[in-house]
Amino acid sequence: IMLVSFDSAAEMVSDLTDDQAKLEAGINGMRPGGGTAFYDAIYFAAKEKLMMDQPRDKFRRAMIVISDGIDTESRWSRDQALEMAQKADVVIYAISTNIKREDTDGDKVLKYLTEETGGQAFFPFKIEDLDQSFENIANELRHQYNIFYRPEPLKTDGLYHPVTVKARTRRDLIVRARKGYYAPRL
């Protein structure tokens, strides 16, 4: 796990580690600031860290964002952040901090980012529901299948290619998958 915080800029709080004490210290040391560079944080984590794990087909990459989905400070756009997450093969899960019982523009952003990467957005309305959101994410990560797809012929154009995944004979299954992939560029 690694921790990235964001206010007016994205900042690495704790690099990739399995040291729980270090992660707890990182979380406890976070303080709210001005502005929200939400898209920059996604872009930074995907490009600077998650794309670097090699070999890329051996590791699952999941990003859990806790946000209201509103961005006020980023240099990168929503779609640039999404593209970088897709290029890094990252599944985004979101836990909304919106406690209103109505959809906001930020909620729509969280849903968009999660749906496009094969993740899911959660909307706990009370702090007591937060644990359940994390548990749902953990359960999903433990109970999912990974499918490796290699098109024939393999295109090396660096472009985005849409893909649809369906369960033909099992209507009881929920298929949550990326909407496509970026081909390698040679």
Image (cartoon, rainbow, N blue to C red):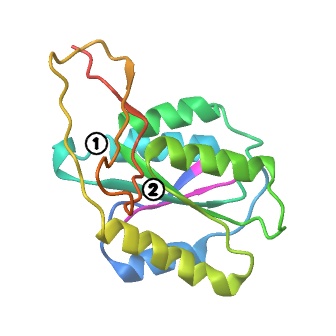
- Label 2 Cα crowd, 10 Å radius (few <14 / some 14-19 / many 20+): many
In the picture, the quarter occupied by the N terminus is: bottom left
Secondary structure under badge 2?
A: strand
Magenta segment = 1-10
Task: Indicate the quadrant where residue 71 lies.
Answer: top right
- Asked if residue 64 lies left or right of residue 174, the reply is right
- Residue 52 badge: 1
In the picture, the quarter occupied by the C terminus is: top left
- Residue 70 badge: none
Please give the residue where the numbered disc 2 appears in the rendered image.
63
- Using the image, determine if residue 105 lies above or below residue 20: above
- Residue 122 x, y percent position in the rendering: 60, 65
| Amino acid type of the residue that numbered disc 2 sits on in the rendered structure | Met
Identify the residue at image location x=26%, y=16%: 185
| Amino acid type of the residue that numbered disc 1 sits on in the rendered structure | Met
- Label 1 Cα crowd, 10 Å radius (few <14 / some 14-19 / many 20+): few
- Residue 47 x, y percent position in the rendering: 41, 38
- Asked if residue 16 lies left or right of residue 134, the reply is left
N-terminal label among 2 and 1: 1
Residue 7 is inside the magenta segment: yes
- Residue 143 x, y percent position in the rendering: 30, 69
- Residue 104 x, y percent position in the rendering: 81, 52
Q: Nearer the viewer, residue 88 or 134?
A: 134
- Asked if residue 76 lies left or right of residue 50, the reply is right
